[in-house]
Amino acid sequence: EAQVTQNPRYLITVTGKKLTVTCSQNMNHEYMSWYRQDPGLGLRQIYYSMNVEVTDKGDVPEGYKVSRKEKRNFPLILESPSPNQTSLYFCASSPRDRRDEQFFGPGTRLTVL
Amino acid sequence: SQQGEEDPQALSIQEGENATMNCSYKTSINNLQWYRQNSGRGLVHLILIRSNEREKHSGRLRVTLDTSKKSSSLLITASRAADTASYFCAHYKAAGNKLTFGGGTRVLVKP
């Protein structure tokens, strides 16, 4: 089944404890993005990648890192999480020829205490 | 600030009724998309309408696009309880590979 998977789906952590949220897609898509969703603010893009080893900042990149060592994976790294990073995170992917049609993962609900 | 605003923010209807929600945006677009999200879960792509199209149908969904007014509407006909969800419009920017989402309309379909 064609899909985008994220792990973990739920995570409660404490301030400053490094964490990684994984994202993997099995559709051979070139483009991948991370978004966060917050009440009243909608979805905002954190980082995106247009291909392996090509990443760039979105609208709200502060406090996050990403890597794209393989085409299928696009992990989101929080080196020192803070409570304002408590949010619902979505990974998305799209193919090169239909970049505008993004497939979303199921989301990761992160709480930073 | 967000581009793309949905109206109304919330909608409550009885099963079988139609639900209509609107989306406005500020920039020129190549296409506009609608997504559904069930209570804090993933986003499901519903339909995409291109800037040279005025109306598009998919099952019980009808989307219109008026580029002169920079607005779109989503109509769900003969609603079902399973249609209860939040609905978002979004438009794509190639620079940044970014979908810009509206604030969403929460739809409650009562059985």
Image (cartoon, rainbow, N blue to C red):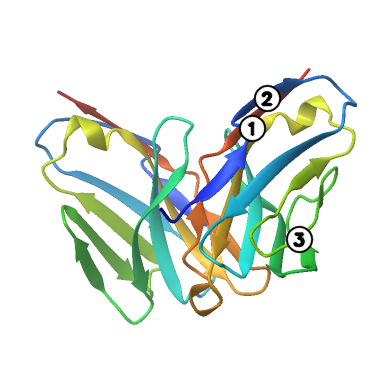
Q: Earlier in the sequence, mark 3 or mark 1?
A: 1
* Amino acid at circle 2: Leu
Mark 2, chain letter?
A
Q: Which residue is mark 3?
A: A68
Mark 1, chain letter?
A
For the residues labelled 2 and 1, the Cα–Cα distance comes to 7 Å
The residue depicted at 58 percent of the width and 33 percent of the height is: A39
Mark nearest the camera among 2 and 1 is 1
Q: Is mark 2 in CB contact (under 8 Å) with mark 1? A: yes
* Amino acid at circle 1: Pro
Q: Which residue is mark 1?
A: A8
Mark 3, chain letter?
A
The residue depicted at 80 percent of the width and 68 percent of the height is: A53
Please rate how many residues cluster around mark 2, counting C-alpha atoms within 10 Å: few if below 14, some from 14 to 19, many from 20.
Answer: some
Please rate how many residues cluster around mark 3, counting C-alpha atoms within 10 Å: few if below 14, some from 14 to 19, many from 20.
Answer: some
Against B17, residue B53 (above or below) is below
Q: Earlier in the sequence, mark 3 or mark 2?
A: 2
Q: Residue furthest bottom?
A: B52
For the residues labelled 3 and 1, the Cα–Cα distance comes to 18 Å
Residue A113 in the figure: left or right of residue B29:
right
Which is nearer the eye, A107 or A74?
A: A74
Q: Which residue is mark 2?
A: A11
Residue B80 in the figure: left or right of residue A90:
left
Q: Quadrant of residue A73?
A: bottom right
Residue B99: x percent and y percent? Answer: 56, 60
